Image (tube, helix red, strand yellow):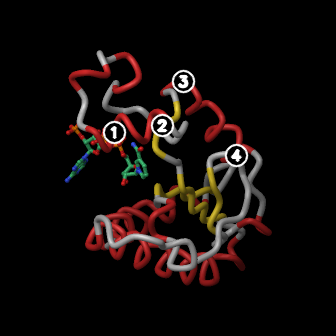
């Protein structure tokens, strides 16, 4: 949570002088308190909930300068290459997530770029998923 805030503060004047004026942070679906149904990864998810709160406040602070703060929950993107691996070599929980369609191919990351391209001040400080739908805090 501190890292994204410090980076945002450090580059703020550059962002404010830029064409798109966007600060984007990668949150996680697991940060949603509303959607929490299991106690998995508590510290990670707590840190992302804190990140969301912090970026929501930053969005309020920077609105008058026209700076947009995007908070994106990317979903479980296959950064580990699980979808290309032999399923027999994967842990059971990963196999189960693949079977339930919960691991998103790496190349769908382009969707997130499209969501970021389309962000306006109305979306600033709002928690969005990788297709641009609003996620509950
Ligand atoms: N992948 C997912 O499914 C998923 C789901 C939800 C949320 N997210 C969020 O998306 C973000 C990226 O996740 P990822 O899966 O792409 O992670 P990743 O593959 O582990 O990449 C993390 C990146 O952060 C860099 N990094 C780590 N510590 C750093 C530091 N102290 N200073 C500067 N750079 C640092 C790493 O640099 P090096 O390459 O040099 O080590 C790497 O490029 C994270 O915030 C994660 O919580 C990811």
Give the quadrant of the C terminus. Answer: bottom right
Q: Determine which residue is flagged by label 4.
A: 131
At 46% from the left edge and 55% from the top edge, which residue is drawn? 26
At 66% from the left edge and 35% from the top edge, which residue is drawn? 111
Which disc is residue 94 wearing?
1
Q: Determine which residue is flagged by label 3.
A: 107
Cα–Cα span, label 1 and label 4: 23 Å
Q: Identify the mark nearer the N-term, 1 or 2.
A: 1
Q: Residues within 10 Å of mark 2 (few under 14, many from 20)?
A: many
Q: Identify the mark nearer the N-term, 1 or 4.
A: 1
Q: Do labels 1 and 3 touch, CB within 8 Å?
A: no
Q: Do labels 1 and 2 touch, CB within 8 Å?
A: yes
Q: Identify the mark nearer the N-term, 1 or 3.
A: 1
Across and down, in percent, residue 104 comes to 52, 34
Residue at disc 2, CB closer than 8 Å to ligand 1: yes
Q: Determine which residue is flagged by label 2.
A: 103
């Amino acid at each position: 949570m501190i890292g994204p805030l410090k980076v945002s503060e450090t580059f703020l004047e550059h962002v404010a002088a830029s064409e798109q004026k966007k600060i984007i942070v990668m949150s996680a679906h697991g940060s949603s308190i509303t959607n929490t149904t299991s106690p998995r990864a508590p510290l990670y998810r707590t840190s992302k909930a804190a990140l969301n709160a912090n970026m929501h406040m930053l969005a309020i602070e920077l609105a008058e300068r026209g700076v947009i703060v995007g908070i994106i929950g990317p979903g479980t993107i296959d950064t580990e290459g699980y979808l290309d691996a032999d399923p027999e070599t994967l842990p059971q929980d990963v196999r189960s997530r693949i079977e339930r369609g919960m691991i998103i191919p790496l190349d769908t990351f382009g969707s997130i770029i499209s969501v970021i391209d389309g962000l306006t001040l109305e979306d600033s400080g709002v928690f969005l998923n990788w297709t641009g739908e609003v996620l509950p805090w």
